[in-house]
Image (cartoon, grey):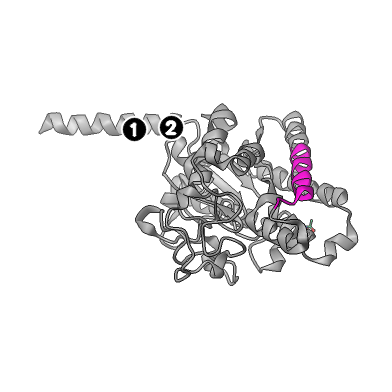
Amino acid sequence: MEYYKEYIFWLILAMKIFLAHAKVPALIVFGDSSVDAGNNNHISTVLKSNFEPYGRDFYGGLPTGRFCNGRIPTDFMSEAFGLKPFVPAYLDPSYNIADFAQGVCFASAGTGYDNKTSDVLNVIPLWKEVEYFKDYQKKLKAYLGTAKANFIIREALYVISVGTNDFLENYYTLPHRRSQYNVDQYQAFLLGIAEKFTLDLYQLGARKIVLTGLPPMGCLPLERTTNYFGGNGNECIKSYNVVALNFNGKLNGLVQKLNGELTGIRAVLSNPYNTLLQMIQKPSAFGFESAAVACCATGLFEMGYLCHRLNPFTCPDANKYVFWDSFHPTEKTNRIISDYVIKHVVNVFL
Ligand SMILES: *[C@@H]1O[C@H](CO)[C@@H](O)[C@H](O)[C@H]1NC(C)=O
């Protein structure tokens, strides 16, 4: 009996030492639907996905509000750091500060760098994600004490994934920003916001920062369908991909600038563009059967409420598709992208 107690004592001590030395004690996530774990469930927007068939390959088949059949990239990253196998949404009342101490997601589907983008579908603007982060810090300090909370805030990995909606939902869809800015000027405008946002996080204590580039957004099934009805066949919209590449180059410039100017910061660019484009161009090389259309419903245009559980066209096996709905990758795609990013980009923090 005594031996048993002693054993437990040493085991707990060893675990505490391990946790105190874990290089990344928490994953803290900002951005849009590429990383939203379900915050939109708790705000008044039509852009939600907390119903079947979303989440059908998640733990327990649970539709959490992730825009996916299963897990999203930040879930895989969290697991790779030895943390939870998924990152909970800050607004989800079934989790509390004890859970969030290891990882928290402030992201909101449909948001952008630009305030005007979050207005379109009434979702959480990026500046408000920062307000939630401040609120989180207060709760973390109350829960763990200031010293431990500051340790987590300093050593956590901050993942930011946003920007696609600024172009697809806003700039190319609504006239306002297009009448103000040409596409180069709009990119400069967004990068200014990205810089200010990163600086805000830095001033709030963040040091390890991952900025995520744009995907080949002209190849999302919805854009290919739009192209088709514009009389151009079911091809990717090349000009959108050019803009994404261009933006990613500039974002990389911002990352270098931040590393040069801010003491103690370590920022990296996570760029999923090429990995995703390879899957789209040669789906069979990755075991996929289709990249042009998505799994859910007809795969041509549906997402959110249109991706409905009673739709008879939804594919039986999402692993055969690069895209789950017309705007978002399947879990399998997310896993391939995350594996690449973990091995080649965020490995510096492992
Ligand atoms: C976005 O809105 C917030 C809150 O009103 C404001 O503080 C911020 O300056 C705005 N951002 C830009 C780039 O206009």
What label does residue 193 carry, if any? Answer: none
Q: Which residues are magenta?
A: 235-251
Q: How many residues crowd mark 1 within 10 Å: few (<14), some (14–19), many (20+)?
A: few
Q: Residue at x 41, y 58 (%)?
A: 56
The x and y percentages for residue 316 are: 42, 57
Classify mark 2: residues with Cα within 10 Å, few (<14), some (14-19) or many (20+).
some
Label 2 sits on residue:
20
- Local secondary structure at mark 1: helix
Mark 2 Cβ inside 8 Å of ligand 1: no
Residue 302 within the segment the image draws in magenta: no
The N terminus lies in quadrant: top left
As drawn, is 205 to the left or to the right of 257? left
Q: What is the C-alpha distance between the residues marked 2 and 1?
A: 9 Å
Quarter location, residue 272? top right
Picture coordinates of residue 190, whole percent (x, y): 78, 50
Q: Pointer 1: what residue? A: 15
Q: Amino acid at mark 1?
A: Met
Residue lying at 79% horizontally and 49% vertically, measured from the top left: 239
